[in-house]
Image (cartoon, helix red, strand yellow):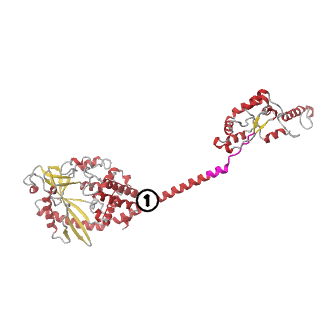
Amino acid sequence: MTGRGRAGNGKSTREQASLDESHSRSKSRGKQSPPPDAKAKSKAVPRVRSPRGAREKEKQSPPPGTKAKINSEERSSKPRGASGQAHITKTKKKCSATSDATDSAFGGSTSPNCNGDVKPKQKMELAKNTPECKDTADTKKTSSRASGKAGSNVCALSPQRPRRAESQKAKLDKKTSCSRLDERASAKDYASAKDYASANKVLLSTLDKLKIKTSAKSDSSSIINLIVNIIIKHMKEKSEYFRDVEKLCTGSYYENVKISEPDEFDVMLAVRVDRVVLQQFDEEGAFYSVALKRTPSKNPLRCFLQEDNTLSASKMLHEFREHVKKAVESTQGVRVERKKAGCPAVTLLVMQDDMEIGLDIVLSLEVHSSWPEFTKDGFQIDSWLGTKVKKDYKSKPFYLVPKYTGKGNEERDGVSAKDAWRISFSHVEKGILINHGQAKTCCESAGMKCCRKPCLKLLKYLLHQLKEKHPKELSKFFSYLCKTTLLHACAARPADSDWDMAGLSDCFQQLLEDFVGHLRQAQLPNFFIPTQNLLGSPFDKKRLEFLADCIERERNNGFPIFGK
């Protein structure tokens, strides 16, 4: 080993000389003055001195006995003079992102040290922690120092970390605020869900209360059928004019929307008429005068014809009433109620155990002809039940019932009001409410359950309770308004999913909103004759607003009237 010129300490003479030269050069670096051209460039691009620890490390000479390997790349990383300044400019391009951010932070006076003295880790920290203009207060400036005889301003940059305590506190406050908002939202959703469940429970319990017992249904219907058969038998045997009447059961009981008790029944006894001429009696198209095109000698209705060949509704109704009275006069527990103004029905009161049942026997004309022109824009069930169903209904006959008032003061084209007939589509309403779904299996055992009928029952019950509470103000309101509101709602929301039984509360609230809207606007068109306003005469604006306010109070307070 000694033959190759190694010193006793393990280093060759050439390597030892190189270390000495490097050590002396590092000591005298600060005292050298840059050339004139470098001094001019230093003003434009100031040098940034290395951190203090790095300078002190450079000043220290390597301890004896330590292996130090200084290659050309390491020596070139310590530039001096003009070549050093060029190296700074070249290095600055490589770390332009760091220098631009630092120049912005310090007003453009200095740039970060981008020479070989700054380690890559320090560059990353410098670029990471250099804030924008608004965060310049978080960066610590260092004063410039003169560098010996050169006179150039040198700025030492010592980057600091951002104030993590404040940022963490802000994040914590933001997180806490969001958590509180989430808690409030969830609490609100929970309250809404709780209120919804509570309202749904009230409605379901009310529907249970309104259910009619099967035994009560059976007992009531059997006695009603018995009385109706007695009347029809009497008509066929004793009456010359009504021996061909046909029974047509209509009304809420036969539509399965009767509430509480089976104490009301409606039965129409229809007389068929062919080839009639209908003359509109009123502007709305709901009332007509009826004239026979042909009057054969054997036609039993000839005796009710007037001079203009129109049928007298008042005469027919009077004769019909007398026959009904004679038919039930010997029937025990049945009596005929006094005639009501504006009511064409003959009302029978039937006692069954401790319950009184009302039976309305209504005279009607069964007209076999096309529906009147005023129905053209009504009966909009195309998107609900389909055009085929609509066509089938319109191919069936319609019915006319007497508009009897007991007074003949009003006249129109020589026809007295008591001889006018009101058009009725009760048979169509019955068919719609029985087969009310878009799907044929709606409300069947194999199909989904909808809440169309339950909503109608609840609305009828609400009106009934309010009428009992305010009889003076609400005596003129009748349940047919509720049925018409439901028919319009079903046409507007035709899908069965819009009436899912699981959403009973929402559906009922929507139906109430529809009904209140009609009351506020004083406008509820007849479902079949849209030109007829059911909320016209005899309703005044004050009564309509009163009922709307009563319904709103019940809605806002969870329907306390249902608990009575």
Left or right of 236, for residue 103: right
Please state the horizontal and vertical placement of residue 492, each as a whole percent of the image: 34, 50
Q: Residue at x 82, y 40 (%)?
A: 57
Quadrant in the picture for the C terminus: bottom left
Nearest the viewer among 371 and 430 is 371
Magenta segment? 156-171
Is residue 431 covered in magenta? no
Looking at the rendering, which quadrant does residue 32 occupy?
A: top right
Please state the horizontal and vertical placement of residue 176, each as a whole percent of the image: 59, 54
Is residue 166 covered in magenta? yes
Nearest the viewer among 133 and 52 is 133
- Report crowding for label 1: few under 14, some 14 to 19, many 20 or more residues within 10 A (C-alpha): some
Q: Is residue 83 above or below residue 287?
A: above
Q: Residue at x 54, y 57 (%)?
A: 183
| Amino acid type at mark 1 | Tyr
Direction top: furthest residue: 37
Left or right of 19, for residue 202: left
Looking at the rendering, which quadrant does residue 223 occupy?
A: bottom left
